[in-house]
Amino acid sequence: MRKALATIGLLALLGGAGCASTGDLNAAQADAAEAKRMAEEAKADAAAARQEAAGARAAADAAAAQAKEASEKADRIFQRSLHK
C-alpha cells in the first residue's frame, strides 16, 4: 500500500513538472529501492545494537551483584574484627 502511494505521489510530482521519461521513472524507482535497502540495513543495525546493549546490561547487572556480594562480605569481616 505504501509503495503504491509513493509511486502515485512520485508520478504526480513528475507529471506536474512536465512529461517524465521512462529513464526518469526508472531513476526514481532505483532511488526508492536504494532508500528502502538503506532503511532495512539501518533496521538490522538497530536490532543488532539492541541485542548488544541487552548483553552489556546483563553483564553490568551481574558485575553489580558480584560487587554487592563482595561488599557485604567485607562488611561482615570488618564487623567480626570489631567484636574481637
Image (tube, grey):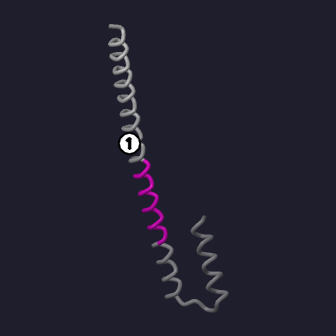
Q: Is residue 44 magenta?
A: yes
In the rendered view, does 18 fall on the left or right side of 65? right
Q: Residue at x 36, y 30 (%)?
A: 67
In the rendered view, does 7 fall on the left or right side of 41? right
Q: Amino acid at mark 1?
A: Gly
Pick whichever, 63 or 38, lies toward us: 63
> Label 1: few (<14), some or many (≥20) within 10 Å?
few
Q: Quadrant of the C terminus?
A: top left
Q: Residue at x 36, y 8 (%)?
A: 83
In the rendered view, does 47 fall on the left or right side of 74? right
Q: Quadrant of the N terminus?
A: bottom right
Q: Which of the 4 quarters of the picture holds residue 81? A: top left
Q: Residue at x 53, y 83 (%)?
A: 25
Main SS of residues in magenta:
helix
Q: Residue 19, how many percent across, how many down?
A: 61, 92
Q: Residue 27, how many percent across, how many down?
A: 49, 83
Q: Please, is residue 44 above or below residue 62 in the view?
A: below
Task: Give the residue at mark 1.
Answer: 55
Q: Which of the 4 quarters of the picture holds residue 38? A: bottom left
Q: Secondary structure at mark 1?
A: helix
Q: Which of the 4 quarters of the picture holds residue 71? A: top left
Pick whichever, 18 or 65, lies toward us: 65
Q: Is residue 11 magenta?
A: no
Pick whichever, 55 or 83, lies toward us: 83
Q: Residue at x 61, y 81 (%)?
A: 11
Give, as a single range, the part of the protein colored magenta. 35-50
Q: Residue 42, how many percent across, how many down?
A: 45, 61
Q: Please, is residue 16 above or below residue 29 in the view?
A: below
